[in-house]
Amino acid sequence: MGRRRRKPLPQEPVQAIIESLAHDGKGVSHNEEGKVAFISGALPDEEVLYKLTGRRRSFDSGEVVEVLRPSPDRVEPPCPHFSGCGGCSLQQMEPTAQIHFKQQTLLDNFERLGRVTAETVRPPLTGPNHSYRRKARLGVRYVPKKGGALVGFREKSSGYLTVMDSCRVLVPAVGERIGELRELINSLEQCNKIAQIEVACDDQQCLLVFRNLEPLPEGDLEKLDQFGKATHLKIYLQPKGPDTVAPLNDDHQTTLRYHLDRFDLDFQFLPTDFTQVNGAINQEMVPLAVELLALSQDDEVLDLFCGLGNFTLPIARQAAQVVGVEGEQSLVERARENAAANQIDNAHFYAVDLQDEESGGVWLNERYSKVLLDPPRSGALEIVQKMGKIRPQRIVYVSCNPATLARDADELVNNQGYRLATAGVMDMFPHTAHVESIALFIRE
Ligand SMILES: C[S@@+](CC[C@H](N)C(=O)[O-])C[C@H]1O[C@@H](n2cnc3c(N)ncnc32)[C@H](O)[C@@H]1O
């Protein structure tokens, strides 16, 4: 049976009044029949003309072609690629308004999904709103009809890569060199055998991991080497899985490290390790989390989803003991190495899958007075349900997804006897719709 042909979308622009922003930063509007449309590039209270980019039974998708009545929060998007590139979704909105939108998203999620209200709302933690992104995965495709190699993020309205020469949110050492990277890929004999470039930067330098699907000939290796030397970028290759990441040659071999100034701690990491995307916000976020834990030298602390010890080692400086738990064995090893390198001997680490309901072990049988949680987007429900057993006085929850934070807050407040003492947003991902937040739960 042949596939049903999709009806072509009407070309006529549609007029709409934008009621609010959805969680992904798209404007929400309803037509006369009550059908909802999600419109990229729009802001609340604006009147716009938009073109349809998709039509489903229950909703339409579109993008703004003309703003008839602009919002006072509207600004000229600073990046020339903003309208097409899917890397950012809020550049048309003044940065202070962006973070207020994110704060409102957090509070709405608490009310609607969590049935909880924060007793106080912390002022947003803010930092630079461009050149902040230290980690990224740039897609690479060789598309002769689009002029050769494309390097960058996917388009807003398709799975194709955006034609772009620069990125304002990436650290400039890489963000200003997207065009040069395209030229580099174009010049390679194996130009269609590079699948992606992983970017990892530290306080001083940037490293690029080229995922090469085939071994590269000598001439291509030479070009990558020259590019790295001319730009001071360290070049690595990844011929197969993550454990095959290796420097192009000895000249590119380097160690990535960042320093947490407030605690005088040095962290080493590999380009494939999880690290917080925004170094400036991390410098503020870790002390804030430690402050909310209100640590004393008697505290026994549990740091869940601890990664390479970003919160664990600062906590160790102020508590009797800290136990860090993390799913990735390699990150646990890095955390142990980082503890040893900083002469910290009161931090212990375990590799455990915390989303496994059966997860347990010696670390769970200890008594802890305080807990820090920093889970992935899926949240931490399985472990939050065990808080009744651990019974910490305080829980500080760092979240990159307000919906799962609100769900877990519901469990803590409405089932486990905690109150939501304070919460606030942190501007970890300016110009995108991602919401990073922190919440403090105190046992009644
Ligand atoms: C948002 S990161 C936080 C890492 C660390 N706290 C930091 O600040 O760098 C979430 C961490 O959770 C880990 N993780 C993801 N799923 C997990 C699971 N099921 N069990 C344990 N750890 C997991 C990831 O490897 C990652 O290190």
Image (tube, grey):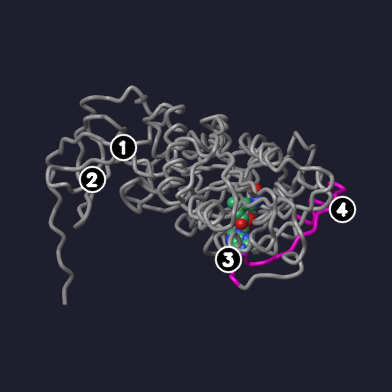
Residue 43 horizontal/vertical position (percent): 31, 32
Tag 2: Cα neighbours inside 10 Å, few (<14), some, or many (≥20)?
A: many
Of badges 4 and 1, the one in the foreground is 1
Magenta stretch: includes residue 209:
no
Tag 3: Cα neighbours inside 10 Å, few (<14), some, or many (≥20)?
A: some
Q: Quadrant of ligand 1?
A: bottom right
Return the disc, 4 or 2, that comes first in the chain's sequence.
2
Q: Nearer the viewer, residue 190 or 286?
A: 286
On screen, residue 70 versus residue 225, left or right, reads left
**Which region is colored magenta?**
335-357
Q: Residue at x 42, y 51 (%)?
A: 113
Q: Nearer the viewer, residue 220 or 321?
A: 321
State the residue position of label 3.
355
**From this viewpoint, is residue 414 visible?**
yes
**Residue situated furthest bottom in the rendering:** 1
**From this viewpoint, is residue 239 visible?**
no
Residue at mark 3: C-beta within 8 A of ligand 1: yes
Magenta stretch: includes residue 355:
yes
> Of the residues shown, which amino acid type is indicated by label 2?
Ala
Tag 1: Cα neighbours inside 10 Å, few (<14), some, or many (≥20)?
A: some
> Of the residues shown, which amino acid type is indicated by label 1?
Ser
Q: Residue at x 15, y 67 (%)?
A: 4
State the residue position of label 2.
37
Disc 4 to disc 3, C-alpha distance? 28 Å
Return the disc, 4 or 3, that comes first in the chain's sequence.
4
State the residue position of label 1.
20
| Numbered label attached to residue 345 | 4
